[in-house]
Amino acid sequence: MWLRRAIFRWLLPAAFLLPLWLFVGWGVFNAGGWAFLWVLFIAVPSVLVGQLVLTMLTRSRPSVRAERAVSWWDVAGYGLWHALTISLGFYDERWWAPVMILTVLVGVGMIWLQGWQLWREARTPAIILRAHDGSPYIPPVDRESSRTANPDPHEIIVVTETRRSEA
């Protein structure tokens, strides 16, 4: 749980620190003039806006707001995307282009993942309760009681009358 909460807290600072790392990495690793133009006009704005949009989508989910922790899918996705973004800041010409393409694909996949998780949670109404120790949980749905509470409107019930014989 500590890792999921740490990622939750890291999301907003990452929107500013990851673009800053790309800019600092350009200077430290002598990337050149074309890389500077790429960093200044493409990388910094796209990573900043992309991370802010992903953070907004993640934090808008009810389970994330209740637990103040991201899901394990988020941990894997953000971990991969941030590791690839950080590796771009090293500007090694031998592997930079394939890593950049992979980073963009993972970023698009993260947008899809966040949208899918948000849709899934928004579609099914869930009641999130807190246990005695303060941890949130979603109570299980009792299928039997939900069936009897909302019977089929087309169900026909036939009651037959039987007479008692009086002795």
Image (spheres, rainbow, N blue to C red):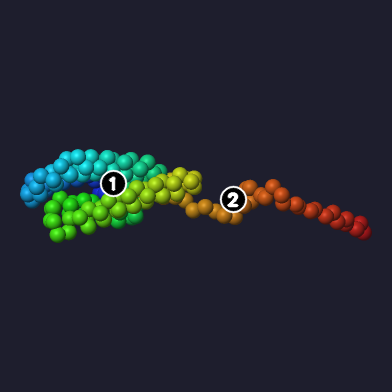
Give the secondary structure at mark 1.
helix
Residue at figure coordinates x 62%, y 48% from the top left: 149
Type of residue at label 1?
Phe
- Quickly name the residue at label 1: 8
Q: Residue at x 9, y 47 (%)?
A: 32
Say which quadrant the C terminus sits in: bottom right
Foreground of the two, 127 or 135: 127
Q: Nearer the viewer, residue 73 or 128?
A: 73
Q: Disc number at residue 86?
A: none
Residues packed near mark 2 inside 10 Å, few (<14), some (14 to 19) or many (20 plus): few
**Marks 1 and 2, the one that precedes in the sequence:** 1
Relative to the observer, which residue lies in front, 85 or 129?
Answer: 85
Apparent side of residue 100 relative to residue 110 in the rendered image (left or right):
left
- Residue 110 image offset from top left, x and y in percent: 33, 50
Percent position (x, y) of residue 2? Answer: 27, 52
- In this view, the residue farthest toward the front is 34
| Residue at which label 2 appears | 146
Instruction: State whether residue 95 is above or below residue 35.
Output: below
What amino acid is found at the position of numbered circle 2 in the picture? Ser
Viewer-nearest residue: 90 or 120: 90
Taking the image as shown, residue 27 lies to the left or right of residue 49, namely left
**Residue 66 x %, y %:** 37, 44
Q: Is residue 78 visible?
A: no
Indicate the secondary structure of the residue bearing disc 2. helix
Residue 78 % position (x, y) = 28, 51
Residue at x-position 80% and y-position 53%: 159
Between the residue at mark 1 and the residue at mark 2, the CA separation in whole angstroms equals 35 Å
Q: Does residue 129 appear to the left or right of 158 in the view shown?
A: left
Q: Residue at x 41, y 49 (%)?
A: 116
Residue 12, compared with residue 167, is above or below; it is above
